[in-house]
Image (tube, helix red, strand yellow):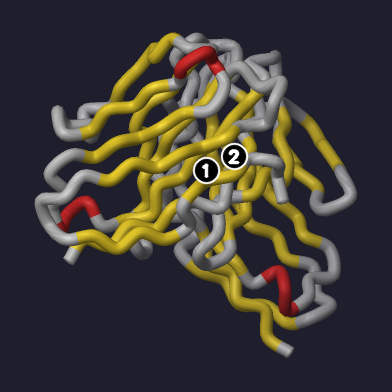
Amino acid sequence: DTGVSQNPRHKITKRGQNVTFRCDPISEHNRLYWYRQTLGQGPEFLTYFQNEAQLEKSRLLSDRFSAERPKGSFSTLEIQRTEQGDSAMYLCASSLGDRADTQYFGPGTRLTVL
Amino acid sequence: LAKTTQPISMDSYEGQEVNITCSHNNIATNDYITWYQQFPSQGPRFIIQGYKTKVTNEVASLFIPADRKSSTLSLPRVSLSDTAVYYCLVGAPMDSSYKLIFGSGTRLLVRP
């Protein structure tokens, strides 16, 4: 257990529905990252926050995706009008933002879109 | 970010030492080398990070030659529970745009 928690761990939804995932980082960590991982591939960067500011978004993050980190604590990732191609493991990581900036990952949320 | 190349898969037996080499020919001056381990249906787990020469912790050692164009993760006396995917990454943690760029990793299978 790295101290990063994600909920839910699994989500099954029908195409077209909206889903929201939550990430609770390690409490003193000011950086928070979202990644997506499909079967057999390494995780792909989606977006990251420095405190409450969203500083970078990948081109993978279409208009249907939105992420927030109110008050610089927990973060949510919402996917609107889900598509089957959104099926993946969504991973959250947090870090101190120090010299080494080691990222600690949560267990992930596995999304299945039917 | 520098691209890395590592073997797709490796096999070993319990009790052996496993060395996984990663090539990163275009590594930049400020880049660090970081290794993660990932089990199925879990998030990646940080193993070790280094900049040059040798780094050792309770889990592994990381050897980095002077030119830093490659690195070797060494796992001493592996057990069945070390079967996992191992990712080598390079990047500059102090950059404001720092993020982890994962490749496909090395799938290590440890046999009894």
Q: Secondary structure at mark 2?
A: strand
What residue lies at 73% left-to-right and 82% top-to-bottom? Answer: B13
Please tell me which residue lies in front, B92 or B19: B92
Q: Are dots 1 and 2 on a single chain? A: yes
The label on residue B70 is: 2
| Residue type at numbered disc 1 | Ser
Please tell me which residue lies in front, B106 or B71: B106
Spot the residue most to the bottom.
B112
**What residue is shown with label 1?**
B23
Q: In the drawing, does residue B13 fall left or right of residue A91?
A: right
What residue lies at 41% left-to-right and 51% top-to-bottom? Answer: A42
Q: Position of residue B89 (x, y in %)?
A: 53, 38
Q: Secondary structure at mark 1?
A: strand
Q: Position of residue B106 (x, y in %)?
A: 52, 60
**Location of residue A100 (image quadrant):** top right
Quarter of the picture containing the N terminus of chain B is top left
Q: CA distance from mark 1 to mark 2?
A: 4 Å
Label 1: how many Cα within 10 Å (few below 14, some 14–19, many 20+)? some
**Is residue B107 positioned above or below A66 on the image?**
below
What residue lies at 52% left-to-right and 13% top-to-bottom? Answer: A71
Instruction: Tell me the chain of label 2.
Output: B
Observer able to see residue A62? yes
Observer able to see residue B67? no
**Location of residue A64 (image quadrant):** top left
The answer to whether mark 1 and mark 2 are in CB contact below 8 A is yes
What residue lies at 57% left-to-right and 35% top-to-bottom? Answer: A24
N-terminal-most mark, 1 or 2: 1
| Residue type at numbered disc 2 | Ser
**Is residue B51 positioned above or below B34 on the image?**
above
